[in-house]
Amino acid sequence: QKKKRSLKRLWSEVHHEQISTYPLQQQSGDGLILALIRTRDQIFFDWSITEETAQEVLQLVLVLLLHAAALFLQFGLTYHLYVTTVDGLFAPFAHGVDEQIEVINRAIFGDPPTALDMDDPLQKSAQELCRKQHSMGFVHLMVLSLWGARMVTEVSETLNKVAILSLILPPIEGRSFIQEGDHGKMTIEHMSCGMKAVVILTDILPKLFCTMFLMWTGGKLFMLTYTMGSLIIPLLTLTYILQIPAILFTGFSSFKFKEKVELTHYQYRMALCYTSQKCQMWGLTVIKAAATGMYVFMLYYVIFGDVTAYRDLCSRYLSLFPQGKCSFGCHLGISKLTGPHKAG
């Protein structure tokens, strides 16, 4: 009997260690999830139309409208920015760039090297584009790395929610999905496959789509712009667009409901990488860093590799035939040529 008691205690400890929690975030998606589950529990255990049921349904409708508005604004602003600004940034490289590259190559690698002739229309356009697109490689890489790290974190958090949903225990007959504890704390202990599918369709997939679209828009914008103002200011603007679901939720939700979201946690089984201490300590960090590096590499050297090569070629030409004063920041690639135009 003593042996059975010790085994029972050991099993309870192991079972306890395999359970973990994850807090809901102050954003419209998690607010919608909480409202959905609370409405389901209320209707499931009380089919009659009561004041509490009406309140839960009304809260669900309000959060659903707020979440829809957040997604609409996030996608709409990103699409408007892409169509009006970002999509046109590639125009200088869309036509005639190969001819300009050939002209610059002849100027640089000629024997002797000769400056471009401003009386020739093709050579003049090549030189004018070079002055605009003078390489700012250090700044481009830095901003792309910052933006990539931010977006990789956003994507990883979304995928982390998918993993947590898959590890939430299935429902138990006669037991609600949410269990209330002390001091108003609530835990989402169970969730049906149908509810998980609703959460994925209403929150995770739209959020993932908007995030990926914003990730592409920001990457293209930061890759194709060529002034400091066009790099730094949009970085703040896109970060603001990314935070729209949290801004709308904290701004328009009631204090009581925001408190409920803050006090609610997912409860899930410890599985997948959550059981690995190495994965939790440094594994996920390495994966995120590698994903950020791959994002920057793909944009800088693969998708827009021609732009990078053109800018490097222009930097080489302008080092041989300066068109103005180049400060210390210019040599580092963080500022532009200044001063009057000078023929090389």
Image (spheres, rainbow, N blue to C red):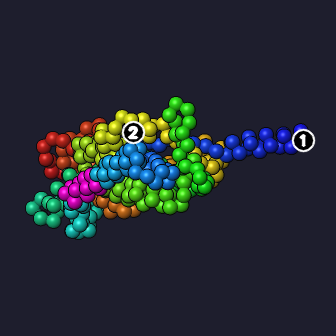
Q: Position of residue 90 (x, y in %)?
A: 24, 61
Quarter of the image that includes the N terminus = top right
Q: Earlier along the polypeptide chain: callout 1 or callout 2?
A: 1
Residue tagged by mark 1?
A: 1
Determine which residue is flagged by label 2: 257
- Of 13 and 323, the residue lying toward us: 13
Residue 25 in sight here: yes
Task: Indicate left or right for 303 with 318 as reference.
Answer: right
Asked whether the viewer can see residue 291, the reply is no
> From mark 1 to mark 2, how far is it between C-alphas?
49 Å
Instruction: Quadrant for residue 232, please give it.
Output: top left
When the figure is inspected, residue 96 is found, relative to residue 313, above or below; the finding is below
Q: Quadrant of residue 123?
A: bottom left
> In this image, 96 relative to 278: left or right?
left
The three-letter amino acid code for the residue at tag 1 is Gln
Q: Is residue 205 magenta?
A: no
The number of callouts visible is 2
Estimate the x, y position of residue 24 in percent, counting from the top left. 47, 43
- Could you tell me which residue is drawn at 49 percent across and 54 percent down? 44
Could you tell whether 88 is left or right of 244 in the image? left
Stretch of the chain drawn in magenta: 71-85
Q: Secondary structure at mark 1?
A: loop
